[in-house]
Image (cartoon, rainbow, N blue to C red):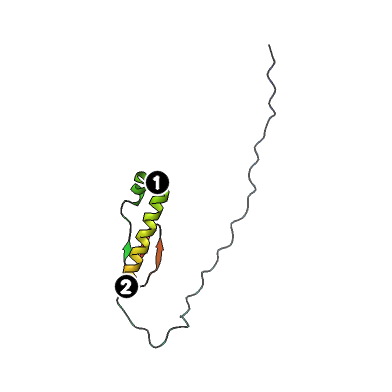
């Protein structure tokens, strides 16, 4: 019979404790230097276009085909929104915000 190999005793060490960083004061808002004229109140509309069932695409299509579909959606939605005079804020795999 072979005797078991003794295992070395490992003493866990605690991670070094570091003090939390000091709180940082957020920057004070500054007026934009590019404003011309008096401020005015305007109505704004925000449009969020999301590709419905985008996660189902991954189940039904190959990854490359699903990626092409998502990109095509973003491109087409962007084209239509720009044609209508929208300002695009964000276009990515999650959708379009204008």
- Helix, strand or loop at label 2? It is helix
Q: Earlier in the sequence, mark 2 or mark 1?
A: 1
Q: Is residue 9 left or right of residue 26?
A: right
Of the pair 58 and 96, the residue shown nearer to us: 58
Of the pair 95 and 24, the residue shown nearer to us: 95
Of the pair 4 and 69, the residue shown nearer to us: 69
Query: Separation of disc 2 and disc 1 at Cα?
Result: 32 Å
Query: Residue shown at 51%/69% (left/top)?
Result: 26
Relative image position of residue 83 (x, y in whole percent): 32, 72
Q: Say which residue label 2 marks.
A: 83
Relative image position of residue 94 (x, y in whole percent): 38, 57
Relative image position of residue 24 (x, y in whole percent): 55, 66
Of the pair 78 and 65, the residue shown nearer to us: 65
Q: Say which residue label 1 marks.
A: 62
Can you name the residue that lies furthest to the bottom here?
A: 37
Query: Residue shown at 38%/87% (left/top)?
Result: 38
- Mark number displayed over residue 76: none
């Amino acid at each position: 019979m072979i005797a078991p190999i003794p295992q070395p005793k490992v003493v866990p060490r605690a991670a070094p404790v570091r003090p939390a960083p000091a709180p940082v004061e957020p920057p004070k808002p500054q007026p934009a230097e590019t404003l011309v004229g008096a401020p005015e109140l305007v109505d704004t509309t925000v449009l969020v276009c999301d590709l419905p069932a985008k996660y189902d695409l991954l189940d039904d299509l190959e990854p490359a085909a699903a990626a092409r579909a998502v990109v095509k959606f973003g491109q087409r939605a962007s084209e239509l929104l720009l044609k209508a005079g929208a300002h695009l804020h964000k276009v990515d795999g999650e959708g379009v915000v204008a």
